[in-house]
Amino acid sequence: MSARIDLHTHSNESDGTDTPLELLNKVAEAEIDRFALTDHDSIAGWQQIKDLVPSGIELVIGAEVSCQTVDALSVHMLGFLFDPENKALIDSMNETRGNRITRMERIVGRLQEAGINISVEDVYAEVSEGATIGRPHLADAMIRKGIVSERGEAFERFLHNRSKFYIPDASPTPEEAIRLIKEAGGVAVIAHPFASLRGRIISSEYLESLIDAGLDGIEIFHRDHSEGERDQLFALVRRYALLVTGGSDYHGKRKVNRLGENLTELSQWEKISERATGYTKGA
Ligand code: AMP
Ligand code: FE
Ligand code: FE
Ligand code: ZN
């Protein structure tokens, strides 16, 4: 049997639209046998479904940790198989979630100054209780107000990383996130690092410095990477013997990404699970 492993998914504990349980059902339908729930800065979804996973499916504990470089570039760091009780990592994610609220208020303030009819209350109405708030929720509020018709349009017109309304979120540096994930016994994999269509990306030199800082792997199989970007990343993987992952970055119904559209090879998964010391379920 071929292993279908999707190591990048979101629920409505961050900016996805499915509840963790709905996601679990869809994973089963998509015949995925191992998946990581990697909500932005949260493991609340994993906590909800960890004891409900049917046999034949393995749920991998994960998170997509928001980071910001000293040059204010946004970087997403996937952590896998860390200890869910590691205080430093959990505290850091909690702090980022809090900072994201202040940041959202500032973005909304800028939109209001430009005459756009949107309030923070409109945005909160789109966020489920306790979830990590992000630009997709603001996009959803803009849809509800009739300002745009879909999330993609909101990002193109107002919310993209080069927009005058954009404010990066206050969060750890990528180096700090790598350290936190690894000290929690996890494995650190940078998410979609060269996805230039999302906005300004980090340089190869900077990515190499993250390898020095302990980065374990690179998410290469992701819909936002072009062929050329994949080739560049594979060159780094070969040079530094890094792990390679893939994932759908599924967010539910408001993004086109389909579960299982990008996958991680079994041999790579095996290396991740061998390397991790934080979460060793069934060991
Ligand atoms: P934030 O976490 O608030 O910085 O927002 C980043 C999130 O926005 C990403 O994790 C994606 O879920 C989403 N996103 C980024 N670009 C787009 C886009 N062009 N269309 C829809 N969603 C996007
Ligand atoms: Fe997201
Ligand atoms: Fe991401
Ligand atoms: Zn993601």
Image: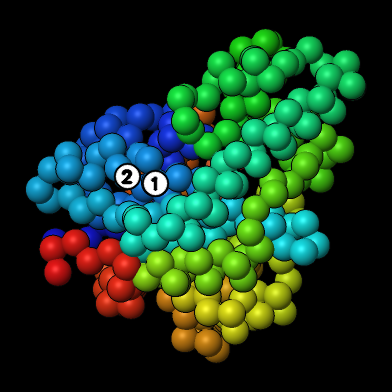
* Residue visible at 74% across and 57% down in the picture: 73
Badge 2 element? helix
Q: Residue at x 38, y 40 (%)?
A: 44
At label 2, the amino acid type is Trp
In the rendering, at what x and y percent does residue 83 appear? 34, 61
Q: Please state if 82 lies on the left or on the right of 143 as rendered.
A: left
Q: Is residue 162 left or right of residue 124?
A: right
Residue 69 lies, in percent from the top left, at 72, 63
Q: How is colour applied across the structure in the image?
A: rainbow
Q: Residues within 10 Å of mark 2 (few under 14, many from 20)?
A: many
Image marks 1 and 2: residues in contact by CB distance under 8 Å? yes
- Residue 46 is tagged as 2
Residue under the image location 21 percent in, 40 percent down: 28
The amino acid type, in three-letter code, at marker 1 is: Ile
Q: Nearer the viewer, residue 237 or 191?
A: 191
Give the residue at the far right of this rendering: 114
Please name the residue that numbered disc 1 is placed on: 43
Locate residue 3 relative to residue 179 in the image: left or right. left
For marks 1 and 2, give the CA distance.
Answer: 5 Å
Query: From the viewer's perspective, is 212 left or right of 51?
Result: right
**Which image quadrant for residue 279?**
bottom left
On the rendered image, what quadrant is the N terminus found in? bottom left
Height in image: 252 above or below 279?
above
Residue 7 locus on image (x, y percent): 38, 56
Residue 225 showing in the rendered view? no
Residue 279 is tagged as none
